[in-house]
């Protein structure tokens, strides 16, 4: 997507607005327009990125990404995998890696803003999308634990506090 025409349009609008302030304001606007071009381009990229994030949330598990090629963004659309009829949820006991390959279902989750921010940071550290990070975290949480508390492992039972037996 070529952003040049959009950047130029905003520059012209800026010059037109400055023209209303007189010749001095118009001259200032022309001097600033070169510096503003990169800020305008960056703002447009941020807007496109926010829009693709919103679209991705709506079309999950499919996604839309913005990739910068030179000075212009490209959009990469990944369609959701086709679900076979009678698709089921991955069974408990599957590994987090195999859960991501199964059929997808959609849920809405409400959470505190601080938790959301922490999840986004954790996903970014791992180089994953928030969705992929949450799927792995949920799958890992559902894994059966192999750890058995020490008392139960030895077969010992917790005794009541008291004594039984013979005393002399």
Image (tube, grey):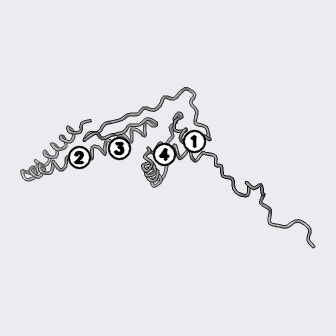
Q: Are marks 4 and 1 in contact (CB under 8 Å)?
A: no
Q: Is residue 87 above or below residue 114?
A: above
Residue pointed to by mark 4: 133
Q: CA distance from mark 4 to mark 2?
A: 33 Å
Q: Secondary structure at mark 3?
A: helix
Q: Position of residue 35 (x, y in %)?
A: 18, 50
Q: CA distance from mark 2 to mark 1?
A: 46 Å
Q: Position of residue 136 (x, y in %)?
A: 52, 44
Q: Quadrant of residue 10?
A: top left
Residue pointed to by mark 3: 50
Q: Which dot, 1 or 3, sits closer to the camera?
A: 1
Q: Of the two numbered discs 2 and 1 on the same chain, state the one appearing first in sequence.
A: 2
Q: Of the two numbered discs 4 and 1 on the same chain, state the one appearing first in sequence.
A: 1
Residue pointed to by mark 2: 40
Residue visible at 43% across and 40% down? 57
Q: Of the two numbered discs 1 and 3 on the same chain, state the one appearing first in sequence.
A: 3
Residue visible at 26% across and 46% down? 42
Return the mark for residue 42.
Answer: none
The single residue placed furthest to the front in the displayed view is: 154
Rendered-image quadrant of the C terminus: bottom right
Q: Of the two numbered discs 4 and 3 on the same chain, state the one appearing first in sequence.
A: 3
Q: Of the two numbered discs 2 and 3 on the same chain, state the one appearing first in sequence.
A: 2
Q: Which dot, 4 or 2, sits closer to the camera?
A: 4
Q: Is residue 100 left or right of residue 168?
A: left
Residue visible at 42% across and 32% down? 79
Q: Are marks 4 and 3 in contact (CB under 8 Å)?
A: no
């Amino acid at each position: 997507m070529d952003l040049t025409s959009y950047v130029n349009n905003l520059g012209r609008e800026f010059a037109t607005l400055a023209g209303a302030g007189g010749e001095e304001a118009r001259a200032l606007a022309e001097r600033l327009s070169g510096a503003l071009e990169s800020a305008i381009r960056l703002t447009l990229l941020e807007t496109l990125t926010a829009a693709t994030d919103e679209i991705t949330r709506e079309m999950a598990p499919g996604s839309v990404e913005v990739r910068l090629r030179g000075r212009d963004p490209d959009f990469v659309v990944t369609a959701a995998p086709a679900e076979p009829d009678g698709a089921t949820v991955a069974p408990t006991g599957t590994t987090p890696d195999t859960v991501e390959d199964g059929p997808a279902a959609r849920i809405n989750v409400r959470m505190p803003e601080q938790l959301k921010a922490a999840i986004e940071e954790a996903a970014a550290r791992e180089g994953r999308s928030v969705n992929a990070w949450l799927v792995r975290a949920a799958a890992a949480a559902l894994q059966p634990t192999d750890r058995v508390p020490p008392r139960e492992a030895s077969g010992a039972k917790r005794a009541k506090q008291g004594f039984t037996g013979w005393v002399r």
